[in-house]
Amino acid sequence: MIDFGYMRANDVADAVRQIAADPTAKFIAGGTNLIDLMRQDVERPARLIDISRLPLRSVEETASGGLRIGALVPNSDLAYHPLVAHRYPMLASAILAGASAQLRNMASTGGNLLQRTRCPYFYDVATPCNKRQPGSGCSAIAGLNRMHAILGTSDACIATHPSDMCVALAALDATVHVTGQAGARAIAFSDFHRLPDNTPQRDTNLEANEIVTAVELPGRGFAANYTYLKIRDRLSYAFALVSVAAALELDGDTIKEVRLALGGVAHKPWRDPSAEAALRGQNIGESAFTRAADVVLRDAKGFGHNTFKIDLARRAIVRALTQAAAGTPQSQSNKKIA
Amino acid sequence: MTRTSTSQRSTSTIRVPEKIPVSLTVNGVETQLTVAPWTSLLDTLRDHLGLTGTKKGCDHGQCGACTVLVDGRRINSCLTLAVMKDGAKVITIEGLATDGTLHALQQAFIDHDAFQCGYCTPGQICSAAGLIAEGKAKSVDEIRELMSGNICRCGAYPNIVRAIQQAMGQP
């Protein structure tokens, strides 16, 4: 690993001051992704600013009936938090579908949002990669791209965002709270991560001097009719080929409200308002679910090794909506798909 | 780039690392160390404290061989910087037995022949100790899922699960 300096931040204002004063510095919290990237020479910060001791570890109910999750709440604590397990079980399920128990004990809420793609060419500094080195080219488009994106890709990058937690947060309409030199601001979850376009080096709309302080959930948790269905190459501890967060509010068999977000298919958690609009007011059932899947995937594009993901995503969407409608969410320990 | 002699290069381009004092309580013993910022907890345990029971498998958080308990929680020590754990209590495989009596998990791994080469075993046992402390795994499916961060290349998984069940007091 490269030589780097190490400082601790005393509070959020101090963290912002330190990062603004040194463009070569990076924040470290759980470190599960950053330390690995530094070992691979992908990230080369001259200094780490340790934010892991900042007081951002609480989970609090908001006045509007939602939940405010401190950026340093570990993934495991969040998944098992009684309010999350009870009111937002789709979020708990998505978190438990990701990584391993050890990594979930280390990884923070804010860090989960900011983890980088696991595209093998991004990790391999001997190969061109526009995300790692803008302008150098994309090795994945004509390379081994089984894990790569089928939606929202660009000629510059077909990487996916690897998070499971973020797929549920996207479906739940979360808000990301950040603080920078210009003060605090709130970013809608769908505006937090970016599509690659011609600037794949930018994963998110977080500014260089900003720190994530909290993630806020609105009151609506879809606790009765939800699922998080993750399809991967082995049954546990693998990144998604395709994952689906599906949540419904039903009036009898009629869909009153619906949320549908996909992981493993794009540079950001993929939500499609037109697919959700196509489901609202419809009766639950395979025909409505298939139509919605067709809407989500209308512009899907494969790159050879990953072309199978288009059909896989279609079937996963139908299966996930069926699970959600039946109130039989996918178990994250018994992997038989219900 | 022009060629430089080793001595020139060492004075011109290599910075002397700034070492940082760290206090760790490892297996009940408080230890003062001075480490470079990039030293992982794993390397600290193995190379600075001579506790080689904790194994380096992948050094990328993918295999679980380096699992230890920090402040009671199982983590991957390879992805942990020692400087970030100043003041922490660390338990390694060497700290599980008490007064010469094996920990229930150690005995169960022997009873069930839950290893072949043994390289992943310290990580498996520390991870299982964390799993039992967490109290979330009840069924075999849950044990398997919540132990999925520990890879066993010999494939001793069925016996590992049985050993953990025994240590949990399951028949």
Image (tube, coloured by chain):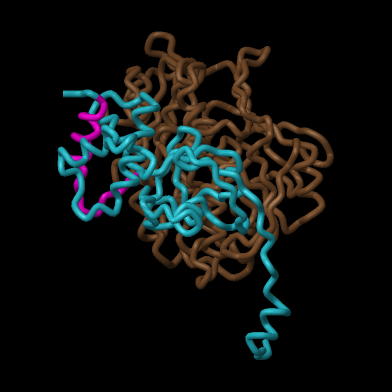
Residue A33 to residue A296: above or below: below
The residue lying at 72 percent from left, 31 percent from top is A186
Q: Colour of chain A?
A: brown
Judging by colour alone, the chain drawn in cyan in this rendered image is: B
Q: Is residue B114 left or right of residue A14?
A: left
Q: What quarter of the picture does the C terminus of chain A occupy?
A: top left
Identify the residue at horizontal 55%, vertical 61% (top origin).
Answer: A155
Q: Is residue A95 above or below residue B39?
A: above
Region in magenta: B150-168
Q: Position of residue B31 (x, y in %)?
A: 55, 46
Instruction: Inspect this view and state whether residue A103 appears.
Output: no
Please, which residue is most extreme toward the right here?
A182
Residue B19 visible to an observer of this rendering: yes
Q: Nearer the viewer, residue A92 or A2?
A: A2
Residue A44 lies, with reference to residue A217, above or below; the image says below
| Image coords of residue A111 (percent x, y) | 58, 41
Snapshot quadrant of residue A201: bottom right
Total number of numbered labels? 0
Q: Position of residue A272 (x, y in %)?
A: 52, 35
Which residue is at 15% across, 44% downward?
Answer: B113
Q: Residue furthest top?
A: A252
Q: Which corner quadrant of the image does residue A248 belong to?
A: top left
Q: Is residue A256 magenta?
A: no
Is B155 magenta? The answer is yes
For the residue pair A237 and B151, the one nearer the viewer reads as: B151
**Residue toward you, A48 or B23:** B23
Instruction: Tell whether A17 sits left or right of A186.
Output: right
Q: Residue at x 61, y 34 (%)?
A: A72
Quadrant of the rendering where the N terminus of chain A is positioned: bottom right
Vertical side of A132 occupied by A298: above or below: above
Question: Where in the figure is residue A231, as x and y percent of width and height?
Answer: 34, 41
